[in-house]
Image (tube, grey):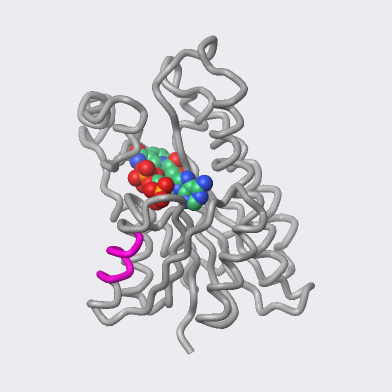
Amino acid sequence: MKKSMIVTGGSRGIGAAVARLAAQRGYAVCIAYRSDAEAAASVVEDIVTHGGVALAVKADTGVEADVRRLFDAAQAAFGPIDALVNNAGILEQQARVEAIDAARLSRVFGTNVIGVFLCSAEAVRRMSTKHGGRGGSIVNVSSRASRLGSPGEYVDYAASKAAVDTLTIGLAKEVATEGIRVNAVSPGLIHTEIHARGGEPGRVDRLAKGVPMQRGGTAEEVAAAVLWLASDEATYCTGSNIDVAGGR
Ligand code: NAP
């Protein structure tokens, strides 16, 4: 039977690249999306056209019942889940801290922190040898922002990614003897639609001159690191966090 992977936020950007590469590497892939059914369906269609196995499930990672339904659907289709990629993440319009209100903090932390906790908890309940599972791998998509802070843009987003870094370390230690590895990748400036959602479509090109490699990265470059951490080539890595940021 094929290995299986859940990729949250797999309908666009980095998540879609992870889903496509995972399918190429032989995983049956379940992608979760929140709103854009058409984008999710086109990733699934692309994977299936190339001979892979994929499924899309509408699930908001910040909602417990949705997360349970997502894992149930993936398990019903593919059997026990081998890997979870916590990729779904959002940011909002560029703003200074004094302009950020509680509603915005709830939205950003709801997806970026609560969503990653809920999906990780569901994965542990199903993967942990302590609960009768057969182990697995969790890869969190954090951000270089957690250490750069994103001043004047989205300190809330950066702080939410710092929480992801800490979850990665703590959970990795918590389940280290239960067959589960927990790691993270921290992308730098990557060409995806997320920057337009923050109000500046050309942000990567504007900031590229501050990157030692003098360019933004691609979703595929991030996906390669995610797949390596999930794979059996990384069996002694847990609690690791790989920067994919061109030296920035
Ligand atoms: P993106 O192009 O905006 O895609 C975000 C994806 O997440 C979409 O598939 C979206 O689905 C999904 N999503 C958002 N909220 C969700 C929720 N609550 N439940 C389920 N799915 C949800 O973003 P991206 O640039 O690929 O970013 C992916 C990850 O990389 C994020 O965690 C981001 O913080 C991180 N990252 C990105 C960069 C960068 O420069 N691009 C740098 C560092 C880190 P819908 O369209 O259906 O809402």
Q: Position of residue 80 (x, y in %)?
A: 59, 79
Locate residue 206 relative to residue 97 in the image: left or right: left
Q: Which residues are magenta?
A: 40-46
User: Does residue 162 sit above or below 56 in this rendering?
Assistant: above
* Residue 121 in which image quadrant: bottom right
- Of the 4 image quadrants, the one containing the C terminus is top left
Inspect the magenta stretch and tell me whether residue 241 lies in it: no
Residue at image location 61% in from the left, 63% down from the top: 181
Tell how many labels.
Answer: 0
State the residue lying farthest toward the top. 98
Q: Position of residue 60 (x, y in %)?
A: 54, 51
Please state which of residues 38 and 234 is positioned toward the viewer in this rendering.
38
* Residue 98 in which image quadrant: top right
Residue at image location 44% in from the left, 63% down from the top: 31
Judge whether residue 187 can be spotted in this image.
no
User: Does residue 81 sit above or below 8 in this rendering?
Assistant: below
Please state which of residues 219 and 7 is positioned toward the viewer in this rendering.
7
Residue at image location 32% in from the left, 79% down from the top: 52
Judge whether residue 182 can be spotted in this image.
yes
Q: Position of residue 203 (x, y in %)?
A: 27, 27
Q: Position of residue 126 (x, y in %)?
A: 68, 71
User: Does residue 39 sit above or below 1 in this rendering?
Assistant: above
Ligand 1's quadrant: top left
State the residue lying farthest toward the bottom. 1
The prevailing secondary structure element of the residues shown in magenta is: helix
